[in-house]
Image (spheres, rainbow, N blue to C red):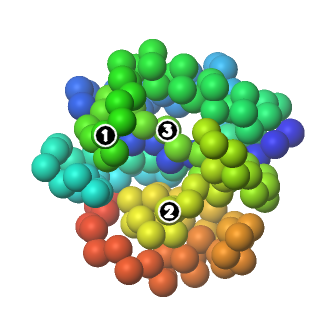
Amino acid sequence: MNSAYLILGSNIGNSLEILQSAVKSIEAEIGIVAAKSNFYFTKAWGNTNQPDFINQAIHVETNLSPQELLEKILAIEKKAGRTRTEIKWEQRTLDIDILFYNDLIIAQPNLIIPHPFLQERNFVLTPLLEIAKDFIHPVLKKTILQLSEECKDTLEVKKAF
């Protein structure tokens, strides 16, 4: 069984319902959801002229390969109404990013693991702290707790409920 950490986000539609539905789809199509963080409200990162996001980190145990995991995630996003464009950081019904897959380091044109910017983003680190504070980043060789303490991102992340 493989271990993957994902970050989910939504800022279009009923984001809470969309995220809850995405977790159900992940359980049905990807594997066992071993842990879930609380939901967090965050301002949009990068392109701030859009609605706030709701984010959640999850830990999934799966038999899928990293590439198969990516394909399933893209299908779940599409099912939720996600339309991908060339514009970065735009609003979306559902965004799912693979943060870690075991302790693998993957650099392919369509898949980079660990996520290359996770250590720079509070909206990723804060929910991840709840479920993986001692996980060691395979490239940076620091725990999620250490990365969170060193993060220079000033974007506020608030527990939603």
Q: Quadrant of residue 147?
A: bottom right
Q: Amino acid at mark 3?
A: Ile
Can you name the residue that lies furthest to the left here?
49
Residue 49 makes an appearance in the image: yes
In the drawing, does residue 112 fall left or right of residue 22? right
How dense is the environment of label 3, judged by Cα within 10 Å: few (below 14), some, or many (20 and up)? many
Rounded to the nearest angstrom, the CA distance separating label 1 from label 3 is 16 Å
- N-terminal label among 1 and 2: 1
Q: Quadrant of residue 108?
A: top right
Is the N terminus in the top left, top right, bottom left or bottom right quadrant?
Answer: top right
**Contact (CB < 8 A) between labels 1 and 2?**
no
At x 74%, y 67%, the residue is 138
Above or below — where is 9 with respect to 84?
A: below
Q: Amino acid at mark 1?
A: Ile
Which residue bears the numbered disc 2? 117
- Judged from the image, the secondary structure of the residue bearing numbered disc 1 is loop
Res 87 label: 1
Can you name the residue that lies furthest to the right here?
1
Res 18 label: none
Image spot of residue 107 (x, y percent)? 70, 52
Rounded to the nearest angstrom, the CA distance separating label 1 from label 2 is 17 Å
At x 48%, y 82%, the residue is 149
- N-terminal label among 2 and 3: 3
Image spot of residue 60 (x, y percent)? 68, 41
Res 96 label: 3
- N-terminal label among 1 and 3: 1
